[in-house]
Image: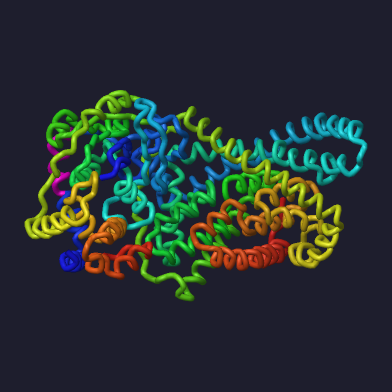
C-alpha cells in the first residue's frame, strides 16, 4: 500500500482523477442543462465587470469610499454622534447622573470612579454608547451592503493588480480584504493559504496595517471632521506601508519568490436583501458591544487607577518626546496610546474624543499611528492561537516601534507638503 | 463498533466555497453563523440541532475546492467526514455552474455515504437562462436532487423531506483502469486492516493515494492496535501531517 501511494504521488494522482471527474461531470451536465439563448449579459454581470475594469475600477473604488465616508464619517460620526454625545449624553444624561451620584454617594473617591474625568460612566459608557455605537452601526450597515453585493471580493482583484506589480502571491490578498471586516476572523481565514510562511506574513500584515471595521469606522468618523482628502491620505499611508513592507520582505527573500496567481472565484453581484443586511448588522453589533463594553470599562478603570496612582502624568511626561516631539501631537494623546494597548479602537476613540483640539495634520498622523498600532486583544489571542506565543510577541515587538516610526515620518512629510483646505 | 458509533445522527452540509452552505445552515437550524457573499467565510465546522428533526445534528463545513485537502480549512472538512457519525451528506452546489458542482458530486459518491444534492441559487441560474432537468439528473445520479434558493427559503421543505430517502449512491464513475487497480488494492487493504464505520474503503483509498494528510493520519492511528503497527505508520506520515502545506506524502 505504501508502495502504491509512493508511485501515485509522483504521478500527481489527484489532478488526473480530477480531470476524469470533470470530464464525467461535463458529459452529465451537458445532458441535463438547457441554456436559453440570450442576447445581452445581465445588468449584474455588466456591473461586475465594470468594478474590476482596469480603467474604471479605481474611480469606482474611490466613489465607493466617498459614499461610505459620507454615510459613516459625516452622517454617523458627525450628525448621529452630535445628537447622542453632545445633546443626549453631555447635555442631559451625564449632568443628571453626575448630580445623582454626587448627591447619593458621599465618598469623593467612588464618585470620581463613576463620573470623574476617567469615570466608568462619563468615560467608559459614554465612549461605548455615544461615540462608538453610532459609528460602528453606520459602518456595519455600509459594510454589510458591500459584502452582500459582492463588491468586497472584487476588491481582491484590484488589490491583486497592485500586488502583482511587486510580485506578491495573489492568494494572500483575500484574507487581507476580509481583514477590513474583522482582523480576528481574517487571521483565522489565513488557513486558506497553503504555506505556513505565507500565513505568518499575512497574519503579521493583518495585525499591522489592516484596520478592522470598528477601527475603520472611528477613522472615518475622526477624519470626517477634517476632509475627504484626509481620509485619502490615511488610506494611501496604509497602502504605502503594505507595499513597501512587502517589497522589502520580497527583496530580503523572506517570501518565496515564485508567484502563484490569484485564482479565486468572484461571486455574482447581487442586490443585497435588506433583511439579511440588518440581521447581519444586528448580529455584529451585539457581538461587538458585548465584547467592547466590558473592555472599555476595564480600560477606563485602568486609566482611573493610573491617574489616581499618579502614574498617568508620569507616562504623559515620559511619552512627551515621542508623542509631542516626534509625532507632533498634544501630550495628552499619550493617554490614547496607553488605551490603544487594550484595543486599537479604544485608543482611536480617545483621540476622537479630543478631535476638536487637533489640527488636520495631527488628526491624520494620530490615526495613522493608532491604525498601525497593535491590534485588539481578541486578534492578539488569535495570533497566539494560530502562530504560538513566541511569534505573536515578536510581531508585537516589531509593530509598536514601527507604528511610531511611520507616524513620525508622516508627521514630517505632511507638515512640509500638505496644506489642508 | 461501539455503541456511540451506531447513533448516526449527523447531517453534513458540504460543497464548494461560496455556494450558500452557511445560509442553508441558518435556514435549517436557526443558528446564527457569519454569512457573506464571498468564498472562505467559514473556516471551521459549526454544528447545531436541526429544526426539522430533533434527533439530528447539522454540520456546516468549510468549502472544499476538491479533495484531497490542500489547506487547513479543507482539512477541517475531511476531519468532519472521518470523525462524525454521519447519517447523510447534503451537497450544496451552485446551479449556475452545474459542471463544477457535479465534479465534486463525482468525488462524494466515492465516499459511500447517503447523499442529497441541493442545487442552490436556482433563481440566479434561471435569470441567466440556465434550466436544469432535475428529475433526469436525479435519475442519472440515483440520489434526490432539489432546486433551492437558500436566501429566499424556497425548496427548503422539499430538501428536508427528501433526507429520509437518501441512499448511498453508486460511485459515479470508474477511473482509468490503471488507477482502478491501485484503488482496488488499497481499498482491500483498508477494508481488511482499518475499516471505517461509515465511509467506503474506496473513497478512503482514493483520498489516501492522493496524499490526503487527514486520511493518512486516521489510517495510521487505526493501525496501531493491530499486529504490524510500524509497517503502516512510517514516521514520514506523521511529519507530513504536521506540515500545513500538503505535498504528496511519502
- Is B176 on the left-hand or right-hand side of B70? left
B159 relative to A266, above or below = above
Where is residue A166 drawn, in percent x and y? 45, 66
- Is A320 on the left-hand or right-hand side of A384? right
Where is residue A205 drawn, in percent x and y? 53, 61
**Closer to the camera in the image, B176 or B171:** B171
Q: How is the image coloured?
A: rainbow
Q: Which residue is drawn at 36% across and 38% down?
A: B21
Which image quarter holds the N terminus of chain A? bottom left
Q: What secondary structure is the stretch in magenta mostly built from?
A: helix
Where is residue A23 drawn, in percent x and y? 14, 49
Q: How many marks?
A: 0
Asked where in the image residue A340 lies, by quadrant, the reply is: bottom right
A283 relative to A227, above or below = above
Q: Residue at x 37, y 39 (%)?
A: B59
In the rendered image, is residue A382 in sight?
A: yes
In the rendered image, is residue B104 in sight?
A: no
Range covered by the magenta-colored residues:
A23-34
Q: Does the magenta stretch include residue A41?
A: no
Q: Is residue A31 magenta?
A: yes
- Is A129 on the left-hand or right-hand side of A154? right
**In the current view of this chain or complex, which residue is farthest to the left?**
B177
Q: Residue at x 32, y 41 (%)?
A: B4
Amino acid at each position: 500500500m505504501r508502495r502504491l501511494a509512493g508511485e501515485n504521488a509522483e504521478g500527481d494522482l489527484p489532478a488526473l482523477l480530477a480531470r476524469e471527474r470533470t470530464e464525467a461531470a461535463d458529459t452529465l451536465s451537458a445532458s441535463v442543462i438547457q441554456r436559453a439563448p440570450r442576447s445581452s449579459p445581465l445588468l449584474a454581470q455588466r456591473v461586475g465587470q465594470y468594478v474590476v475594469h482596469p480603467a474604471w475600477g479605481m474611480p469606482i473604488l474611490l466613489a465607493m469610499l466617498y459614499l461610505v465616508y459620507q454615510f459613516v464619517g459625516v452622517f454617523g460620526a458627525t450628525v448621529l454622534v452630535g445628537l447622542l454625545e453632545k445633546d443626549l449624553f453631555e447635555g442631559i444624561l451625564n449632568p443628571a447622573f453626575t448630580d445623582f451620584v454626587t448627591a447619593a454617594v458621599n465618598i469623593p473617591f467612588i464618585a470620581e470612579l463613576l463620573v470623574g474625568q476617567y469615570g466608568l460612566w462619563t468615560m467608559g459608557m459614554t465612549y461605548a454608547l455615544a461615540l462608538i455605537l453610532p459609528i460602528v452601526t453606520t459602518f456595519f450597515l455600509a459594510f454589510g451592503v458591500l459584502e452582500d453585493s459582492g463588491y468586497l471580493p472584487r476588491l481582491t482583484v484590484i488589490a491583486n493588480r497592485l500586488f502583482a506589480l511587486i510580485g506578491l502571491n495573489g492568494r494572500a490578498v483575500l484574507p487581507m480584504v476580509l481583514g477590513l471586516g474583522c482582523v480576528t476572523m481574517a487571521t483565522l481565514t489565513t488557513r486558506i493559504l497553503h504555506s505556513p510562511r505565507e500565513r505568518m506574513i499575512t497574519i503579521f500584515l493583518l495585525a499591522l496595517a489592516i484596520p478592522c471595521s470598528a477601527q475603520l469606522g472611528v477613522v472615518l468618523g475622526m477624519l470626517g471632521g477634517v476632509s475627504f482628502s484626509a481620509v485619502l491620505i490615511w488610506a494611501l499611508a496604509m497602502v504605502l506601508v503594505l507595499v513597501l513592507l512587502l517589497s522589502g520582505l520580497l527583496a530580503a527573500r523572506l517570501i518565496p519568490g515564485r508567484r502563484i496567481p490569484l485564482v479565486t472565484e468572484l461571486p455574482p453581484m447581487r442586490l443585497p436583501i435588506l433583511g439579511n443586511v440588518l440581521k447581519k448588522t444586528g448580529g455584529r453589533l451585539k457581538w461587538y458591544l458585548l465584547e467592547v463594553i466590558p473592555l472599555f470599562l476595564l480600560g477606563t478603570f485602568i486609566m482611573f487607577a493610573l491617574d489616581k496612582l499618579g502614574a498617568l502624568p508620569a507616562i504623559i511626561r515620559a511619552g512627551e518626546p515621542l508623542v509631542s516631539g516626534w509625532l507632533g501631537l498634544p501630550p495628552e494623546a499619550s493617554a490614547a496610546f496607553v488605551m490603544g494597548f487594550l484595543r486599537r479602537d479604544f485608543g482611536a476613540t480617545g483621540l476622537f474624543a479630543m478631535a476638536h483640539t487637533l489640527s488636520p495634520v495631527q488628526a491624520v498622523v494620530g490615526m495613522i499611528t493608532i491604525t498601525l498600532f497593535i491590534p485588539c486583544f481578541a486578534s492578539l489571542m488569535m495570533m497566539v492561537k494560530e502562530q504560538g506565543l513566541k511569534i505573536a510577541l515578536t510581531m508585537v515587538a516589531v509593530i509598536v516601534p514601527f507604528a511610531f516610526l511611520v507616524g513620525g515620518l508622516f508627521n514630517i512629510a505632511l507638515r512640509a507638503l500638505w496644506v489642508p483646505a | 463498533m461501539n455503541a456511540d458509533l451506531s447513533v448516526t445522527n449527523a447531517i453534513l452540509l458540504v460543497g464548494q466555497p461560496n455556494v450558500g452552505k452557511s445560509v442553508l445552515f441558518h435556514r435549517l437550524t436557526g443558528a446564527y453563523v457569519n454569512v457573506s457573499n464571498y468564498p472562505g467565510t467559514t473556516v471551521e465546522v459549526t454544528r447545531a440541532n436541526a429544526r426539522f428533526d430533533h434527533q439530528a445534528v447539522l454540520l456546516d463545513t468549510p468549502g472544499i475546492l476538491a479533495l484531497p485537502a490542500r489547506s487547513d480549512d479543507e482539512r477541517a472538512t475531511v476531519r468532519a467526514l472521518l470523525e462524525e457519525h454521519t447519517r447523510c451528506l447534503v451537497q450544496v452546489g451552485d446551479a449556475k455552474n452545474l459542471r463544477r458542482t457535479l465534479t465534486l458530486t463525482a468525488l462524494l459518491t466515492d465516499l459511500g455515504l447517503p447523499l442529497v444534492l441541493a442545487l442552490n441559487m436556482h433563481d440566479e441560474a434561471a435569470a441567466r437562462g440556465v434550466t436544469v432537468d432535475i428529475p433526469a439528473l436525479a435519475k442519472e445520479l440515483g440520489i434526490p436532487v432539489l432546486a433551492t434558493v437558500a436566501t429566499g427559503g424556497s425548496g427548503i421543505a422539499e430538501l428536508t423531506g427528501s433526507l429520509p430517502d437518501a441512499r448511498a449512491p453508486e460511485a459515479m464513475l470508474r477511473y482509468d483502469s490503471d488507477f482502478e487497480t491501485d484503488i482496488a488494492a488499497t481499498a482491500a487493504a483498508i477494508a481488511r486492516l482499518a475499516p471505517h464505520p461509515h465511509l467506503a474503503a474506496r473513497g478512503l483509498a482514493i483520498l489516501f493515494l492522493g496524499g490526503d494528510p487527514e486520511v493518512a493520519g486516521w489510517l495510521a492511528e487505526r493501525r496501531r492496535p493491530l499486529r504490524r503497527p510500524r509497517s503502516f505508520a512510517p514516521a514520514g506520515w506523521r511529519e507530513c501531517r504536521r506540515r500545513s502545506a500538503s505535498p504528496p506524502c511519502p
